Amino acid sequence: MEKEIQAKVKQIKLSFRQMMDGAVAQSMRSKGVDYHLNWGVTLPRLREMAEKEGKDYHLAIALWKENVRECKILATMIMPPEDILPEVVDIWMEQTETTEIAEQASFNLYQHLPFAPVKAYEWMASPSELYQLCGFLVIARIFMRGQEPNERGINEFIDQSLVALQSDSLAVRKAAKNALYRFSELGIVYERLAKSAMRTIGVDFI
């Protein structure tokens, strides 16, 4: 099985070479997004590949180990969220080095984890900006599905959001503000809480 997986990884990497978009890769480099290897394959093309491959735990694990932008993004697309263990998610987070990978992992995989809320709160409280980004992206998607936090969750979310709104990272500030907006959509009480909290640090509601 290991040989089959490695052969599949090799085949996928060859297909990336054929889809190479130098303009996209160069654009990323010019914006300071530097990967060990980046073929510049667009996200729609990667989604097409993911649909063709289907969910595959072992292939996702093997792809993530490759220090290649497209391999890591494809891994987040084909990993079955119900199969990945919290410890493996922790390893993937530790190995996430760019905003793009953090965003793709959050949207494609992390928001669908059975333990997504637990990880979201854990990440929001992290000193790492990439962890915070993932936390707010995931919690926003959870709120969008209408899942309401308990009282402790509400207080923790608001506290972490206010800290994040004053972050040096634009991506974290935007993610926190969007999460507060999604929180406010849960109902009038949540909206009032969000507006009141934001007023305390002089930030306008969306």
Image: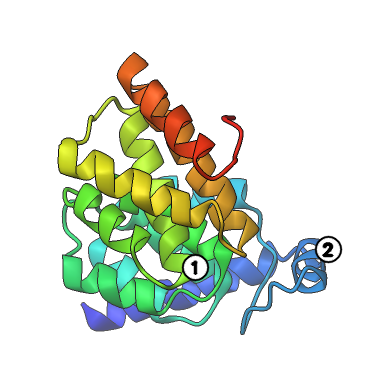
N-terminal label among 2 and 1: 2
Query: Looking at this view, is 125 or 32 the one in front?
Result: 125
- In x, y percent, where is residue 30? 82, 71
The answer to which of 126 and 146 lies nearer the viewer is 126
Q: For the point 38% across and 38% down, which residue is it?
A: 141
Q: Is residue 105 visible?
A: no
Total of numbered circles in the picture?
2
Residue 59, quarter of the rendered image = bottom left
71 vs 159, left or right, is right
Which residue: 47% across, 78% down? Answer: 10
Identify residue for label 1. 129
Point 44% across, 30% down: residue: 196
Give the position of the C terminus as an image quadrant: top right
Mark 2 residue type = Ala
Q: Amino acid at mark 1?
A: Glu
Q: Are marks 2 and 1 in contact (CB under 8 Å)?
A: no
* Corner quadrant of residue 34: bottom right
Measure the alpha-carbon separation of dots 2 and 1.
28 Å
Residue furthest front in the image: 200
Query: Which type of secondary structure does the marked residue at label 1 adopt?
Result: helix
Could you say where residue 14 lies in the image, as x and y percent from the top left? Answer: 58, 73
Residue at the extreme top of the image, as rendered: 188
Q: Residue at x 49, y 72 (%)?
A: 11
Residue that mark 2 sits on: 23
- What is the crowding at mark 2: few (fewer than 14 residues within 10 Å), some, or many (at least 20)? few
Mark 2 secondary-structure assignment: helix
Say above or below: 22 vs 109.
below
Percent position (x, y) of residue 117?
23, 48
The foreground one among 83 and 8 is: 83
